[in-house]
Amino acid sequence: MAYTPQEVTNIQAVEDIAIQNDGTVKCNIILSWTDPPAWCEYIEILVKEQDATDYISCGTVRKGTQNYIIYGLAATQTINIKLRVIDVYGNTSQGEVIELQLHGKEAPPSMPTNIRFESSVDSIALFWDNPDDYDLDYIEINQFKGAAQPSSPSEGTIVGRTSGNMYTIGGLDDMYVYWYWLRAVDTSGNVSEWTEPVMVVTKHLASQLLNFRFEDSELAEELGEDILNKALQNDEDYHSERGRFHMQKTAIETLETAITLLSPETEDIQRIINLLNEVEENTAAIEEERIIRQTTDEMLASGITTLSSQLEENTAAIQQEAITRADADEALAQEISIVAARADDNTAAILQEQSARVAADNSLAQQISVILSTTSMAIEEIENAELVVYENSDNILGEILQNDEDYHAERGRFQINR
């Protein structure tokens, strides 16, 4: 079973525009990634442009580099980038692929940053830092009214555009929650992403109510002039108008008395003001806490997702290691079986050799026994022959002595027998 290395993770690709000497635009791609935890020696970078059918290798880098730049791609196209892992044995992974849209001159601007605000009873002023894009045209302001944070900018309404770095929205309700997003638009009509929503709460009317005086107001002046004119013209409705004037005057005087009793110097109204301020501060603090908790929950969820991904990667690595070790154990078991078979063959050969040697030794012993028996018989025959010779010698000697003429013949026969 062929081993396949693990893939890289966390691939990031950023487009960088390069203006050529002839004015044409080329795109460089700045890549970064995270190497797999094990069995990685090289990373190969391949690219397939929009009209191509096959990937082209751009190069390889050693493990631990974790970045690469692809130069000179045509702008305004969609490309695919593949990163493959190669281990020390030359095994290659299938490759991790990402798709990237190259904009060239159509690249969107960056987002506005550092958003601040000031609020009043019925208006909100927003401030921000514009991006550094050379072709920036204006900033769009998107507004949503409601206490609950909207899920996306699509729930809001664009309420203004400006080429500056501040904007004021008027005609708002007091003590109400508004949400704002900002985005940049360049001279080509490309738009940035919306910023994160900013929550703003308008102020309450208590301070304006406490400083209100009817006799100094435009309403008092208008009512007085209207009644006076009708009186001078001897209007038939003079008396009714005069009665209405006195009723309104009485109501206004009553309101003035109530407002006087609720002057800022009294402890009751001061407590009310303090309570209203505390309510406003607590509302902002609660919303800030909610945002912080939401951010914390999102970070926790992201951490859990990352941990889960790492756990899955580790599990895959362990499973791959188990497969590799199982393959190695299987190969080792096969080699052990081969060695055992060879040992059995050698044992059989040794036993056969031992049997052959025992048989040879028995045969040799038998031959030695035969030789010893034959030798013993020969010795016995020789001894018998010697006895015969001695006996014949005595006879021959007697014959010699008796018949000397046969001496030489007998002596020759004696020599032969001896």
Image (cartoon, helix red, strand yellow):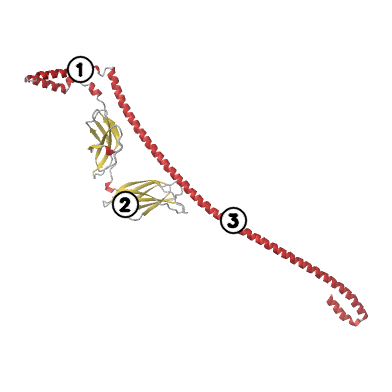
Q: Give left or right: position of 264 versus 388.
A: left
Amino acid type, residue under disc 2 in the picture:
Leu
Q: Earlier in the sequence, mark 2 or mark 1?
A: 2
Query: Which structural element holds mark 1?
Result: helix
Q: Position of residue 311 (x, y in %)?
A: 44, 43
Q: Which residue is mark 2?
A: 73
In the rendered view, tell whether residue 392 sits above or below residue 83: below
Classify mark 1: residues with Cα within 10 Å, few (<14), some (14-19) or many (20+).
few
- Nearer the N terminus, badge 3 or badge 1? 1
Query: Can the viewer see residue 47?
Result: yes
Q: Which residue is mark 1?
A: 254
* Residue at numbered disc 3: 340
The one nearer the camera, 223 or 89, is 223
Taking the view exactly as shown, the residue that stands out farthest to the bottom is 405
The amino acid type of the residue labelled 3 equals Ala
Q: What is the quadrant of the C terminus in the image?
A: bottom right
Q: Residue 392: percent from the left, percent from the top?
A: 88, 76
